[in-house]
Amino acid sequence: MLILFWVCFAVAAYVYIGYPLLLWLDVFGRATQRRDAHFDRRFIGGSGDVPLVSVIVAAHNEEVAIEAKILNLLASDFPRERLEILIGSDGSSDRTEEIVRRHQQDGAGLISFPKQQGKSAMQNGLVAAASGEILVFTDADCVSDSAALRLLVENFADPQVGLVTGAPRYANAGETSITENESAYLGYESWIRQEESRRGLLAMASGSLFAMRRSLWRPLDRNLGDDFELPLRTALSGMRNVLERRAVTVTRLSQNSAVSMFGLKSRIVSKDFKALMDYRAILNPFSHGSIALGLWSHKLLRWFAPYFLLGIFFSSAFLHSAFYRGLFLLQAAFGILAVLGFFVRGPALVFPWSTPTSFCVVNLAALVGVWRSLTGRASGRWTPVRDH
């Protein structure tokens, strides 16, 4: 039991503290400076050609958000004659298509899919109709600064860059204890991605906004997520994924309770775990070096962290010194607070008392998501939840 405790403790500590610390200490490679200034001058107002950019928006029953999305894209400072906007309606039964048609004369293209296929299947159809050298994927419910597209595209002046992801933020961070903790977690996650990007280790993107070279595109597996499958492909091709932290995109988080957040995260984990298993060659550190180690540390071990946390809990229950008994009681109290958080609505359970619920939601979702993936229950279908 003593060995079990310390092995599980070491792995859990490495996942949440050790890996970020080693990144900061440059153990996984020295951080590089931002691209040279001449890259910025080659695109958008410089001497080089401005690439044709196709913006891909997959939508299913998005009548609440789609008009704001279209207006946001049309307000971009990217040269309008080099920008193509394609919105796909995935079997929408509301006013989504009617709203998009009102803006077709402004440059918003509509492709209607009468039967719901799922997000990735829709994106395959939209890309087939797109003309751009650079493909931009963005969600229907987020808005970005007018400079966001330009900032993303500037990175492609570096021929080694294959995919560029934006930096997500939540508009309703303090709405409930769940959204507050999720916003804090996003800050932690964004810092890790930033450090991975600076070291050439990044192999994931934010689904709210990212761009990639058309030359790297191949149709998506309909049961995988675009924001993980495409970065994995980019890394395997030998090109870099980078984070453009100035390209901020803001989303209102609809999953503002423990139950809805659990549903979102378990679905994401099930798809991402399947993607990583399908592209498992990238996990070989002898072939892919630090990128493989980053994926083991940032993704795979984090998804399996619940097993190590359970190992800590049960082994400490059988160890008899005051230290282990005290630790067991602390874990039990942590669990009681987590359960309490499931029944509290709104911001009533404030930080730090709300942290156990969010922490347990994340880990329970990892347990369930991996199980769903292993049993073949990962699905590309999605039903967005929007406030009316």
Image (cartoon, rainbow, N blue to C red):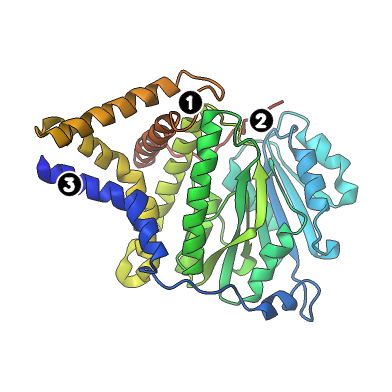
Circle 1 crowding by C-alpha within 10 Å: few under 14, some 14–19, many from 20: few
Up-down relation of residue 128 to residue 51 (above or below): above
Q: Mark 2 highlights which residue?
A: 386
Q: Mark 3 highlights which residue?
A: 6
Q: CA distance from mark 2 to mark 3?
A: 44 Å
Up-down relation of residue 159 to residue 15 (above or below): below
**Residue drawn at (74%, 47%), measured in percent from left and top?**
87
Discs 1, 3 touching: Cβ within 8 Å: no
Up-down relation of residue 7 to residue 192 (above or below): above
Q: Is residue 268 left or right of residue 172?
A: left
Q: Nearer the viewer, mark 1 or mark 3?
A: 3
Q: Earlier in the sequence, mark 2 or mark 3?
A: 3
Q: Mark 1 highlights which residue?
A: 259
Whether residue 302 is visible: yes
Residue 99 figure quarter: top right
Residue 363 spot, x, y in % from top left: 37, 37
Say which amino acid is labelled 1: Val
Q: Earlier in the sequence, mark 1 or mark 3?
A: 3
Residue 112 figure quarter: top right
Q: Residue furthest top?
A: 343
Circle 3 crowding by C-alpha within 10 Å: few under 14, some 14–19, many from 20: some
> In terms of depth relative to the viewer, which is nearer, 276 or 349?
349
Circle 2 crowding by C-alpha within 10 Å: few under 14, some 14–19, many from 20: some
Residue 231 spot, x, y in % from top left: 51, 60
**Residue drawn at (46%, 44%), measured in percent from left and top?**
271
